[in-house]
Amino acid sequence: MVRSTNSASTKMAPSNRIFTLALLLLSILLVPVVGQDPKTQYVYGTDAHGVTRELPVNRYPALYTGDFGDCLGGESLFNITKFDAAYYADNLTIVFHLDGTSNIRNDSLMMQISVDAYGSNRFQMVFDPCLLNIYSLCPLNASMPVTGWAVIPVGPQQIGGIPPIAFDIPDFEGSTTLKIFANSSQTQIGCFQAVMRNGNTFSHPEIVAPILGVFILAAIIASFSTAAYGFSLPHMRMHYAHSLSVFVVWEILQSVFFSGALSVEWPSVCVAWWSNFAWSAGLINVPAISSAVNSFVGVTGNSSQVGGAGSVVLNNAGGLITQIYGRSLGIPASASIMKRNPYNASDPFDYTWAGEPVGLGLPTPGTWYGFWGNLAGFSLPAAAALMVSLIWLVIAVALVALSVVLFKFLLELLSRIRLIKNDRMSYFRSHWLRYLGLAVLRTVFISFFMVMLLTIFQFTNGGTGSTTAVAGVTFVVYFIAMATSIALACRARTRLGRFEATSDRVVFHRARVLKIMPGLVPAWESTLRDQGLEVKPVFSIPLSRVRHVNHDSDSPSIHQDQAYIKKFGWLSARYRRSKWWFFSYYAVYLFGRAAFLGAGVGSPLVQVYGLLIYEIIAFAVIIILRPFEGTRNNALAAWMLSISKILTTGLSVAFLPEFNIDRIIATAIGVVIIVIQGLLIIGMMILVFLSAMSSWMSLSRNREEFKLDYLESTRVKYFEKMESKAADEFQPRARNRKGKDKEDPDETLGAATEPSFSVLSVHRNPKIEDEDEADVLADLEGPTIYDPQSPDAPSRAIVTRASRANSVGSRYSVASLPRAGRPHQSSVSSRDFAMWNPATIDRPDSSLAQRLDGNGAPSVHFGDESDISAARKLEGQISYQSLRSPTGSRPGSPFSPGGRMTPSRETLARYAEERSRSNSTPIPYIK
């Protein structure tokens, strides 16, 4: 029963004329759109529970088909442009729609439709198309197009095999198959299969890719800024080493996607999940690029239909005729192949959930085997994978180079219009061509694993001669370029010494991993012995160790060698001083992993088990070496990424065809893999955010104050930890029986062993003889200096303030007399002249930067040894807050009642001028 519903018009009140006019104008604008919408039509349906309800005809079914293909490998005697099937659980009906043509002259048919879900047949039915009034198939005639459409009612017993969870679980794993048989020869002449869907999926690349892109862009900016900001190369390298490695971030995304390169039967949930990360490997399916690449790699044909000539004989003991009589091979078909009609919005019975013919070079829909099935998740043929990836790699390299050039000219523009200072990012602006070259080399190094895997896979998969030639040239060029760069980097550092092999042991002792989890931490026995460290070993493993002995004892260390940093810092800058060569080992590891994934597609057992053992060995090596100088990089690359690889490969063993596990169990294991990799991605995103914050702190190292006051102590600790990490000294902390860290003996040296007290603060109330508060704070501002360049000098005074961390004058007076009782002004020492350096007055250096720049204390000349000793006592002290507020006004004194604000700058300058005129001792001025 079908009925139409018309919406009643709503009458507006006369008083709401403005609202009525606005509504009328809006309706006029929407007339072209609203006029195309059909009137909603409804049908009555009864579900499996006996509930009858009114249902719109344009509703989405519970299960419906997606893309479809020829399950006879292109041998079906039909050319199909539409194959749609759906199951409506709300009225227990199965609908299928078939459009196409055939080259069979005249024959009667039998058809079978079946639904498979999670490896088992859940529904099947054999029927005569004549009984369902499909007249174009009753009988089949080459002169008549095939237009089959049928509604098949089913009972609860027939669909009882479909579990209820199938209607809600993401990426339903199932397929609908339609088989066509010729009665005259009892031969199967057509087979078409379509993947089943329920509308829920893990595949959302249009959402996931932009979100991850934002985090990757943040990681790139944070990493590049630490490498480009500063003047001292060793100091810049130290800050760069503690930013999160973009190489590791990119490897995480690629490792997630290339998990699907193993030759196993993947569950559909994994394939959908990995499609969110295909862009990280340069596998972006743009129709314009894909169509151009397909013609080059030999993927040709008619993508608007599936099927072709040929037949397959039924295997039922040989009692059937093996040839179709009367095939219309010599007669041109009167019904030419038509493209699928687009969605008709004016037809209330049309639908939008239909699939399309499977793309050229793709496997049959509903199968997800190996890397081919992984690429089919976003409709990319395996033969075109390498070419598409190379095209996007060239685009990425061009974007990187263009970004560096634009950043250089942007800085120059901002400097010209005086939005930034002239010396801002001066090192980068004067060496931008070197940065450009190193950025391109770093991008090539990041893509090394991807290119090696795809080229080796192209050799294994085969293809046209032109594709194989491109793969061979790319492989040779990439391999030689990386091998040469690594060899030159190692030779530049080892040419002045020799290698020696010694026997050593790896000692495992108890410690807390990441300061949270208790575990076993490895260390070389020779390292512990050389540094005089004692640990309680749990067990040890004898190993051989290769060392390089440098003959030149005066040569700088790897991270102090500025010439080496300029040439090969893009390879070694992030690693510890003793593990600077780790990039060479990791390149070999990545090449071995690419060989397992690319060359092992024909031997699933060897590929999966070999890669699992390989990952376990690599994990042990990277944990023992702890190569990165930054803690976050070690946590992400050595622990999180390696554990994710091992668990993913280990769980993939269950998908091997030899085990043939239940597909529901396979789906559950696939969800576990998604959870593991999802946690890895979330952890990466958190570390990217923390790296952006730490890089912000690194960029503020020349500032005395940090914008976020509550992070000031964290910033100082971060800088101090950075310096201690740069020393690359192994210092395990001793532990007591309860597992807690013992206090450092040096920290407790001299501590009182008897009852004692300590003064935390002293509060002084104001007295009658105290002068105005401004007189006290003006002394804190430092000496008043006449500016000889000023037109009204000496009547105009400039009040300057030296950093309290640099100023010994911060402890200027310890006398108990109030300020009004002091007989005269204290004398001026030579230290005051040093602090009146015009360079420091114009732009004083940050005391925090002077302490942490690695170049020692600031260059200040003192008058006598007492001054030097006083400065040494204050060296290393930190000024945690400034006496100035961010707005430029001075805060109230902490000792003043009510926290009254101090006078303005003009008032302070006037007080200073009056004191200078009344003082008999002339104040020196700067010429």
Image: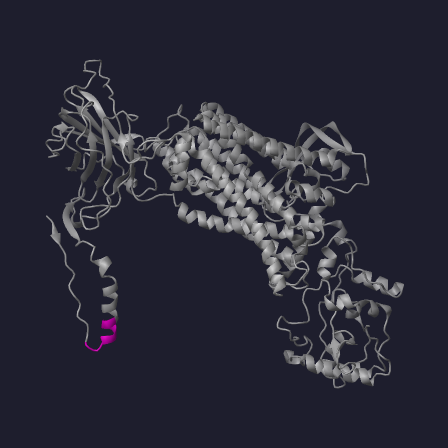
Q: Nearer the viewer, residue 9 or 722?
A: 9
Would you place residue 510 above or below residue 926 in this image? above
Q: Residue at x 55, y 50 (%)?
A: 403
Q: Residue at x 23, y 18 (%)?
A: 313
Q: Specify whether residue 655 is in view.
A: yes
Q: Is residue 328 left or right of residue 710?
A: left
| Residue farthest to the top, as pictured | 318
Q: Is residue 461 left or right of residue 485?
A: left
Q: Is residue 918 left or right of residue 300?
A: right
Would you place residue 273 above or below residue 184 in this image? below
- Main SS, magenta residues: helix
Magenta span has 15?
yes
Q: Position of residue 771 (x, y in %)?
A: 75, 84
Q: Position of residue 38 (x, y in %)?
A: 18, 53
Q: Nearer the viewer, residue 608 or 590?
A: 590
Q: Residue at x 53, y 29 (%)?
A: 473
Q: Residue at x 42, y 32 (%)?
A: 296
Q: Position of residue 71 (x, y in %)?
A: 28, 28
Q: Residue 621 occupies which quadrant of the picture?
A: top right
Q: Is residue 99 left or right of residue 675?
A: left
Q: Position of residue 451 (x, y in %)?
A: 52, 34
Magenta span has 825?
no
Which range of residues does the magenta coloring cover? 14-21
Q: Residue 641 occupies which quadrant of the picture?
A: top right
Q: Quadrant of the C terminus?
A: bottom right
